[in-house]
Amino acid sequence: MKLAVAASVLAASVLTPPCLFAAEGLGLGVDAGIGGVAKAGRWCPVRISIDNTGQSLDGEIVVTWGDSVVHRRVVVPAPSRQRFDMEIRTNDARPEVHVQLIAGGVEVRSINVPLRTLPPDSETTLCVTSTVADESTCEAETPPSRLPRSMRGYDAVERVVWRESESGLTAEQRSALEAWRAYRRLAEAGALAAPPRAMAPASGAPTEPSLALGTVGMLVYACALGAMGVAVHRFRWRPLPFYAMVVATTTCGAAAAGLAGRAGPSSAVQVRYASTLQQLAAGRSLISARGHLAFPAFDTYQVRAVIADAELAPASRSGSRAWLDEGGYPVVAGTHGLAASQAFALDGVAPLAPLEIERRANHIRVTNASDVELQACQFSAGVAPRDLGVLGPGRSAEGIASDTSDGADLTVSCLLARPPIEFVDPRYEVRVDGTAMLRASVPGRTTGEAPQ
């Protein structure tokens, strides 16, 4: 009897999985949408707070809206309270956002947050107030404390109306609001930079030698096996040398296969992309990039884009799945084969504002305020001289606008001499081949003397 009881206890202990994380003392709070509203195809902000009074948490947040999913790794020590801002968009807009908190591969908390979805082409006004707003003029309302910390969080609204002073905003909230206002002015004037075309994978990329080397290695390996088959007749009465040849050939073949894509000049992850940057206010630029990643070997990768306010996902916007690391940086994570390629789309806001543009009357001065050389700079039509050439760091150039130009349609465009986005992987070298077209608008006409 005692033996049977002991056996049942042992079986229960084996069959019952251990509890990897105790959820006691863990609180999850979620606020989705801007003023509770969202639109299909637009960024939807999701503000998540984790209140941890139990044990330290090392897990991930999973946000699902429609057919899009965003994962973010989080580390929340105990005791502490942390806030995480995430953005998600989908063409399959649903009236709720599902948020999960995962630890040890197990869901420890989850919540469904309702959303009011509006037509994508509707004109939406957001009222910022701490009191009840006039519902006849406000499709959405929110207190200042819940305003987004990213410009992308305002994507579902066309106007923001303040019913009180704009004081009390954090520096991040202020920067996001100023950048969004600059974006709206450009959008209404039809002066936004066009999105880039996806760059095809480079022909003759360094991953191709890895594939060729592996093919040659397999042919040599097959020839060696054939030679051993012939030699077996010679060593049929002396098997020890034959077995030694088999072991040596197998070992060399396995070593060559293991090193394919992991050693030599073809062992780097290749990133090739084209991007456009639309310079906004508050030291920010709206960035859009399209390209491909090529992987040198069969392995697990975590390629991170060093830009904190962006999403890096497969090229299709619908049904996408994106990942963020613990710092909020977008990553491409997963296992990929030898010489495999993956198309990606990156959209976000970069902390870049390379150009300073001053205008007094019809005189326009353009200065490169960055540490990157700007090439092929030129004004749009209506300013002479149109071509500005190369602007090194700290260099300036001037132009004179025609009397009929009011500044609404005047722009400056340049090519950046180096890619604006850095990519890194913890285990592999990453080589980036990227182009960037920068566009900035010229301020409207003002009075005063021309700059000296």
Image: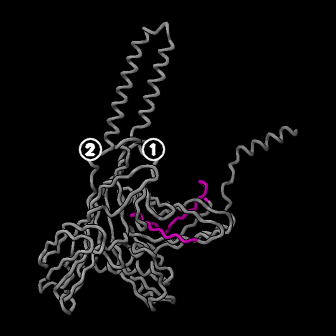
Mark linked to residue 204: 2
Residue at the image point whose x is 42% and y is 45% from the top: 336
* Residue 93, quarter of the rendered image: bottom left
In the image: residue 182, left or right of residue 364: right
* Distance from Cα at disc 2 to Cα at disc 1: 21 Å
Q: Is residue 402 above or below residue 1?
A: below
Magenta stretch: includes residue 386: no
Residue 120: where, in percent of width, then height?
A: 36, 72
State how many labels appear: 2
Can you give x and y, in whole percent of width and height, for residue 207 in the image?
Answer: 33, 43
Q: Amino acid at mark 2?
A: Gly
Q: Which residues are magenta?
A: 82-107
Residue 298, visible in the rendered structure: yes
Which residue matches tag 1? 299
The numbered mark, 2 or 1, whose residue comes first in the sequence reads: 2
Is 409 on the left or on the right of 35, as rendered? Answer: left
The three-letter amino acid code for the residue at tag 1 is Asp
User: Residue sitting at 53 percent across and 60 percent down?
Assistant: 73
Which residue is drawn at the image coordinates 45% and 46% (left, top)?
Answer: 335
